[in-house]
Image (spheres, rainbow, N blue to C red):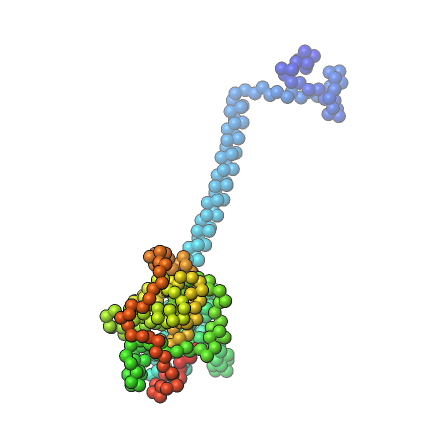
Amino acid sequence: MLELINSKQWGMKLYDKDNKSASPSEAYWIEGTHAYKPILCRLRQSASKIIGIFILVTCVLGILCGIYFLVRHRWRKEEEDVRLMYTFVENIIDILRKHHNACQNDKDLPPYLPIPHVRDMLIKPANRKKLAKTWQRAVRFLSANESRIRVESQRIAGEDFEVWRWIHIASSRQQSQKMGAMGSPKGKFWQGQAFENFQWAVNPPIISPTPCLKIRNMFDHEVEMEEGWHVLIQDAILEKCSDAGANIVHIAVDKSSNEGCVYVKCDSHDSAGIAFKSLHGCWFDGRLVAVKYLTLKRYHQRFPVALYATEALRPSGRSPSSLVTFNPEDQDDQDNNDSDLEV
């Protein structure tokens, strides 16, 4: 027994009752430091470790997959909400435009619509609670991005409501008829600034965030029949901006746009700021022009050729000068809709 205990091969250790090392005569229990197990036992232990690791890895992968599908679901939900929001925006604009046209024929109709009333026209009662957040996003989007719609407060049946009013903008056909009656020269012309104090009325950013602009209400594609009419639009913008000291390196007229959109890229942020101030809030061909900034990345995605445009553009020379300013006070012929024209 002593030989077995003293043998290093077996790795025996002796302890007394207090779990302290003891001599063979004082030993209370023995511990073996080297385990000699059968092969089957070792295989079982190895299999248990492998199964444990496999279960752990499976759990980690399961958690990661769950997070992935959750994030993907939220992305899809966000995309659906954004698409639905833009659908609401388009429908709201269509309703307000039709209501404005109806007001021209029926003077008894109020020139505005309560926002809750428009919501009730577009969303069924069962879905109003579910779509409440999306509807509010559409309302905020219109307030921030749609210059043709103004939010007002009106008292209706003894209660205060927020309402939408469509800001009337005369069409190019109406303005051409007016100018023809006045004996004005034919063509497209800039007709002055709508704001007496541009800085106070528009409050433009101090530093232009991007060299790219989106210009709206430059034309009505449904009434533009003349061949090459888009060149007149381009030349008018280039002439107006060049006169103000802004250099444009790329310009594109969206001929099918319902909003009369023209896209412009300037050679610098400073030029974009000058172009913004010279165009936004101006009357052109009887239309109130609105301008907003576009990100450079989005502009290049839409117009890849603009990425390499560096040379300043000049008017083609085929169009008459557009910088003839008409004084609105000289226009004696005002139609019945002019009282609705507001900024």
Q: Quadrant of residue 15?
A: top right
Q: Residue furthest top?
A: 3
Query: Where does the image place residue 335, in percent across and percent down from the top left?
Result: 34, 85
Q: Residue at x 38, y 71 (%)?
A: 243
Query: Where does the image place residue 105, in percent across and percent down from the top left?
Result: 33, 83
Q: Residue at x 48, y 43 (%)?
A: 62
Q: In this orientation, which residue lies closer to the viewer: 271 or 51?
A: 271
Residue 94 visible here = no
Q: Residue at x 73, y 25 (%)?
A: 19
Q: Residue furthest bottom?
A: 332
Q: Is residue 52 above or below residue 230?
A: above
Q: Quadrant of residue 181?
A: bottom left
Quadrant placement of the C terminus: bottom left
Query: Where does the image place residue 329, in percent across and percent down from the top left?
Result: 39, 86
* Number of numbered discs on residues: 0
Q: In this orientation, which residue lies closer to the viewer: 283 or 338?
A: 283
Residue 263 visible here = yes
Q: Residue at x 46, y 50 (%)?
A: 70
Left or right for 313, reference 205:
left
Quadrant placement of the N terminus: top right
Left or right for 109, reference 39:
left
Q: Is residue 295 above or below residue 219?
A: above
Query: Where does the image place residue 27, in percent across and percent down from the top left?
Result: 73, 19
Q: In this orientation, which residue lies closer to the viewer: 303 or 27?
A: 303
